[in-house]
Image (cartoon, grey):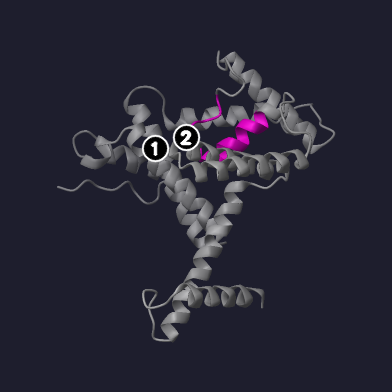
């Protein structure tokens, strides 16, 4: 006999927690949900965060509502697994972030005041460092920059952390000089044919580009996401243009596709 869903007149978050509890019930729950662990659902958590970012990029607020719900479900799912293990529950997660936000905003919830946004940011980072130290973390300044972040984002965070202690290029001109140097080394490895060395040099170029974006206060993941979307848009223009001519991509050639690409650029400027 199917389980009865939690009543719809419950407060929405309370109902979601009850639904997840039923899905994880050892006797009547969903076999798939019961099999999951922190590690097995972590990729879904990351994916849902990206889908939230995609909805924001498209300015689709209806989709954003749904994607935020999917992301909230991931938090509830992790908290439920922890509760099943006797580690902590959803209320503990909410309590911890409540306490942290109040602690890190003494200028709002206390007597502290800051002269500027920059001063506030410096104080925020100092508080985070104190919290890490109190937990016995950080043999290295870079220890708690998550390894699971997208590589470009992690490069920005690593170098931003190092910059706080003065390990940074003085200005953008030094970064551009380093970029030219790394491109030269990459070109040399293309000629040499050493694939392992080439992989390293391409990584170096990307790392310097992440630094350049940081110095210019541009988020490289956002910039690349926008360029990806632009590429998709223009390539789809090529496909549509060929379809109007009764042709397929396979029946076309680079010259024709390039001409349509240029037409897509012109159309975007209108």
Give the foreground label among 1 and 2: 2
On screen, residue 64 above or below 89? below
Q: Is residue 152 on the magenta stretch?
A: yes
The magenta region covers 144-161
Q: What's the mark number on residue 20?
A: none
Q: Which residue is drawn at 53% across and 73% down?
A: 258
Q: Is residue 121 on the magenta stretch?
A: no
Q: Position of residue 224 (x, y in %)?
A: 57, 53
Q: What's the mark number on residue 148?
A: 2
- Does residue 60 show up? no
Give 139 or 95, whichever is nearer the viewer.
139
Q: Indicate the secondary structure of the residue bearing disc 2.
A: loop
How many residues crowd mark 2 within 10 Å: few (<14), some (14–19), many (20+)? few
In the image, is 161 to the left or to the right of 246?
A: right
Q: Quadrant of the C terminus?
A: bottom right
Disc 1 marks which residue? 42
Give 219 or 8, whichever is nearer the viewer.
219
Q: In which quarter of the image is residue 137?
A: top right
On screen, residue 113 above or below 250? above
């Amino acid at each position: 006999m199917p389980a009865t869903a939690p009543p719809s007149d419950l407060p929405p978050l309370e109902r979601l927690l009850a639904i997840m509890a039923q899905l994880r019930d050892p006797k009547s729950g969903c076999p798939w949900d019961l099999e999951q662990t922190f590690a097995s659902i972590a990729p879904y958590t990351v994916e849902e965060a990206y889908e939230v970012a995609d909805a924001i990029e498209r300015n689709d607020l209806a989709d954003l509502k749904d994607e935020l719900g999917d992301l909230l479900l991931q938090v509830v799912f992790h908290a439920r697994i922890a509760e099943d293990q006797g580690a902590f529950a959803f209320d503990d997660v909410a309590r911890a972030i409540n306490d942290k936000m109040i602690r890190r905003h003494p200028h709002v919830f206390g007597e502290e005041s800051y002269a500027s946004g920059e001063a506030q940011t410096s104080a925020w980072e100092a508080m985070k460092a104190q919290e890490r130290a109190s937990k016995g973390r950080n043999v290295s300044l870079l220890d708690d920059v998550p390894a699971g972040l997208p590589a470009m984002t992690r490069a920005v965070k690593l170098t931003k952390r190092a910059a706080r202690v003065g390990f940074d290029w003085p200005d953008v001109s030094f970064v551009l000089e380093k970029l030219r140097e790394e491109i030269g080394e990459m070109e040399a490895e293309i000629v040499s044919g050493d694939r392992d060395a080439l992989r390293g040099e391409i990584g170096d170029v990307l790392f310097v580009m992440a630094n350049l974006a940081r110095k210019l206060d541009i988020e490289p993941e956002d910039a690349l996401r926008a360029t990806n979307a632009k590429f998709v848009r223009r390539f789809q223009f090529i496909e549509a243009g060929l379809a109007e001519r009764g042709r397929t991509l396979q029946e076309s050639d680079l010259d024709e596709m390039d001409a349509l690409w240029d037409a897509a650029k012109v159309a975007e400027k209108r």
